Amino acid sequence: MTQELRRSIAEGPLTRFQLVAIAVCVALNMLDGFDILAMSFAASGVKADWHLIDTQLGLLLSAGLVGMGLGSLTLGPCADRWGRRNVVLLSVALAGAGMLAAAAARDYYELLGLRVVTGLGIGGTIASVAVVVSEYSSDRWRRAALGAYATGYSIGATVGGALATLAIPRFGWRSAFVIGGGMSLLLLPVAWRKLPESLDYLLTRRPPNALQRVNLLLSAMRRPAIDSVPAAGEPGGTPVPPSLGAQIAVLMTPTTLLVWTVYFCTMAGFYFIVSWTPRLLHAAGLSASQGLTGGVLLNLGGIAGCALYAAAAARFDAHRLLLTALIGSAALITLFSRTMIQLDSALWTALFLGVISNSAMAGLYAVGPPLYPTAVRATGMGWAIGIGRFGAILSPVVSGALADHGWPPAQLYTAFCAPFIVAAIAMFVIGPVRRR
């Protein structure tokens, strides 16, 4: 019965209820985009006010990513136990409170701790909402829905960045966190009313009133009610999941190591770009406002990049598209290092770099899942994303330390083309491994 229910949703048309649920998840993913950009846009003002060195600034840029990793690891399992909707609502409230508190931070260490708190909320949110998007999409539209979900990151970064560009010169760096906290808390009542509980959670965990709640969701999707919710392993129920030892045995393959390399290197290069671009453009000689504009254009290109990748993946091989995006990212970041002191060239290159680097990020989520067997797919992807987050955390810290040792901005960008080259090599090797 459970498998038949899932199949009817996968093969049926998308209803208005499902489209609204997906739209809410896209909006929640926008918080991830703006949270990263808020700190990068505030970086120059924070450094000037508190006389920080670039290593300290790099730690501030990484603190939110550390929190996101911890949130995904801790709040993700809580969502499986207590319900994804409940944990998402708690996480959004935590992220909003952390952003507003950061606006009132009195010193470096207080802001550092609040960035971790905000990251916890963001990590708890994104650990669950992508699952909801996948569950409430049909097979025909799932790839487009996940592409739209990935685009939410760039939309949030662009909208929030545009608002921050207007607010920071007038009200100071703290206004970036006020805007982020306000956006989070405005989304909270929308999510409360419109975000449905995960069907998989209701069917597998069977909380109190599970049958009634499932039937309410089915009614909203214009599907017939069911009479009972079978337990895992029962006829018609969900298959019993493999043990952790069995999952590890299946995952420990050369393909897994290559996938980890792709995720780690791609996220390291990508988060260096989005975290440091406004600050490094300013350090290279452009004004603070021009640096902020470069950051906005970078994320505006990201919207186009995610959308283009989603559209192209429906017609072409996703593996080759990701390989092309990684090579293009390495080429464009090198070009950016040569043009960043010339305003017109720097802004145009930032726009195209945003297109191609965000295409690479979108490609990770399209290429990764099919490389794992169905029984361990969620675990495999969770580990890959976790390994990738380590790259995202390390890159701002390493680049800040290199800046303190005298590396000019152009040299930093040239160095960070290396992660994209390594990821492209690993992605190229995955092709023959996948065919075998």
Image: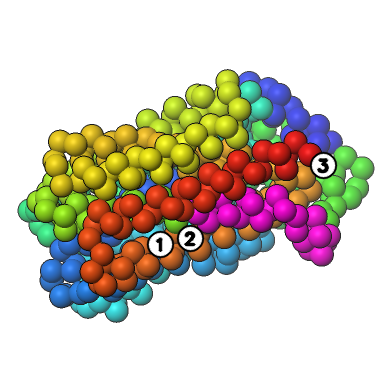
Q: Amino acid at mark 1?
A: Ser
The residue to which callout 3 is attached is 228
Query: Is there any visible trace of residue 37 in the rendered image?
Result: yes
CA neighbours of label 3 inside 10 A, class few (<14), some (14 to 19), many (20+): some
Asked if the residue under mark 3 is in contact with the one under mark 1, i.e. CB atoms within 8 Å, the reply is no
> Horizontal placement of 216 versus 393: left or right?
right
Kind of element beneath mark 3? loop
Q: Amino acid at mark 2?
A: Gly
| Residue at 56% in and 50% down | 262
Mark number, residue 205? none
Residue 105 image offset from top left, x and y in percent: 23, 73
Query: Is there any visible trace of residue 223 in the rendered image?
Result: no
| Residue at 22% in and 61% down | 408
Q: Nearer the viewer, residue 52 or 120?
A: 52
Quadrant occupied by the N terminus: top right
Looking at marks 2 and 3 on the same chain, the residue that comes earlier in the sequence is marked by 3
The residue to which callout 1 is attached is 395
Q: Residues under labels 1 and 3: Cα distance?
A: 50 Å
Give, as a single range, the part of the protein colored magenta: 243-266
Q: Residues under labels 2 and 3: Cα distance?
A: 45 Å
Q: Quadrant of residue 49?
A: bottom left
Kind of element beneath mark 2? helix
CA neighbours of label 2 inside 10 A, class few (<14), some (14 to 19), many (20+): many
The residue to which callout 2 is attached is 391
